Amino acid sequence: MSQENFLDRLTDKIKNVKIIAYILLIVAIIISIDQLTGAFDNFVSRAKKWSDFFSNKTQIDTTSTSISDSINNKIKTYSLNIFSIPENAMIYVEGKFVGRTNKQIELSSGSHRIILRKFGCEDYSEVVEVPRQTVLSIILVRK
């Protein structure tokens, strides 16, 4: 086999490898675009759920009293809607666990310390004034 023939065959193989590399690159880009599209669709779906939730809650009277409190102590309670991203964070009111986000809770009038906890995120703490504040929307910071 001559040296020229060998170089020609080697050049052809290099061209084939380049073509395969380009094909693999195109496949990787298509997969990435597909994953981004799925993530965007998931985001849009969640945003629509939140929008629907807010539009439904605006029709609720947030000054209504809790039946059990009315019977027992005649204490008026108010609704506080608590949302977080990511969802399913633990909600503590005055140090007592009351549920997970996204949730509507009933509180008496006045100041209340709200703490949100989620594994992998920093705790969030805020004092809210009820009934002046009716919604608490928090984006938790990852550790």
Image (cartoon, rainbow, N blue to C red):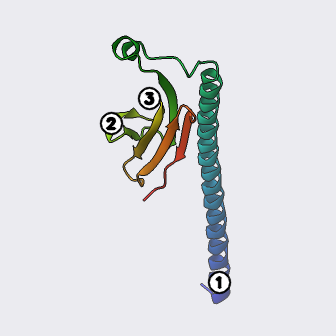
Closer to the chain start, of discs 2 and 1, is 1
Q: Residue shown at 43%/38% (left/top)?
A: 88
At label 2, counting other C-alpha atoms closer than 10 Å, the crowd grade (few under 14, some 14-19, many 20 or more) is few
- Position of residue 78 in the picture relative to residue 75 (left or right): right
- For label 2, the residue is 97
Q: Percent x, y for residue 120? A: 39, 53
> Nearest the camera: 91 or 79?
79
> Callout 3: helix, strand or loop?
strand
- For label 1, the residue is 7
Q: Percent x, y for residue 71? A: 37, 11
Amino acid at dot 3? Leu
> Nearest the camera: 34 or 42?
42
Closer to the chain start, of discs 3 and 1, is 1
Relative height, residue 143 to residue 62 (above, below) = below
At label 3, counting other C-alpha atoms closer than 10 Å, the crowd grade (few under 14, some 14-19, many 20 or more) is many
> Callout 1: helix, strand or loop?
helix
Q: Percent x, y for residue 60? A: 59, 18
> Callout 2: helix, strand or loop?
strand
Is residue 86 in view?
Answer: no
- For label 3, the residue is 107
> Nearest the camera: 124 or 128?
128
